[in-house]
Amino acid sequence: KAGYFNNYYVRYFLGIADGAPIPWDEVTEDHYEAAKQILESFDLIIPMDHLGAALPDLQCAVGDNYDLGVSAAPGGRYDWPISWPSSDEALQRCEFKSDGTTKGDERLELCQLFKAHNEWDQKLWEWALTRWEERRA
């Protein structure tokens, strides 16, 4: 079975040697904790929903060698987007009803299957988001 539909991000951060050989549906809390430990070594983790607001933080992380155009103007000199459409959390949690069509039924089933087989990726996302929000507070 394709590992990229089964806790892909946990596997990704563990690397090819450690993440890829994990059998389907056998990613564990230990793997999740190892992925978190790797992410904790990063200077900055920015959820995509917050990228536009993180420009000063990103400039600080990359240093003076890279000009990201930070200025007093929103979006800086390069007019970076300062807001992104928010993720639909109800869709992420599969909290929607099928519209009664075959396509709607299949969409809900696929969402539920994806959610069931990616528990540790979901936890990793929630951890990264919390880390960002706490750092910003």
Image (cartoon, rainbow, N blue to C red):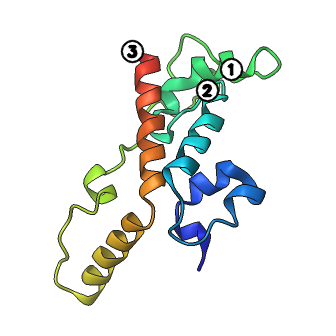
Q: Secondary structure at mark 3?
A: loop
Q: CA separation, marks 1 and 3? A: 18 Å
Q: Is residue 57 above or below residue 24?
A: above
Residue 81, image x and y in percent?
A: 51, 34
Judging depth in this view, the residue of 3 and 109 nearest the camera is 3
Position above or below: 56 against 89: above
> Residue at 55% across / 42% down in the picture?
33
Q: Is residue 52 left or right of residue 44?
A: left
State the CA–CA distance, disc 3 to disc 2.
15 Å
CA neighbours of label 3 inside 10 A, class few (<14), some (14 to 19), many (20+): few
Residue 89: image location, x then y, percent: 29, 50
Q: Residue at (67%, 28%) from the top-left corner?
A: 41
Dividing the image into 4 quarters, which one contains the N terminus? bottom right
**Mark 2 surroundings within 10 Å by alpha-carbon count, few (fewer than 14), some (14 through 19), many (20 or more):** some
Give, as a three-letter code, the residue at label 2.
Leu
Of pointers 1 and 3, the one earlier in the residue sequence: 1
Q: Quadrant of the C terminus?
A: top left
Q: Is residue 8 above or below residue 2?
A: above
Q: Position of residue 125 (x, y in %)?
A: 46, 44
Q: What's the mark number on residue 137?
A: 3
| Tag 2 residue | 44
Front position in the image: 70 or 58 = 58
Residue at the location (63% across, 21% down)?
77
Q: In the displayed structure, does residue 81 sit left or right of residue 106?
A: right
Report which residue position mark 1 lands on: 61
User: Identity of the amino acid at label 1?
Assistant: Ala
Q: CA distance from mark 1 to mark 2?
A: 7 Å
Contact between labelled residues 2 and 1, with CB atoms less than 8 Å apart: yes
Nearer-N-terminus badge (1/2): 2
Secondary structure of the residue carrying numbered label 1: helix
Q: Earlier in the sequence, mark 3 or mark 2?
A: 2
Q: SS for tag 2?
A: loop
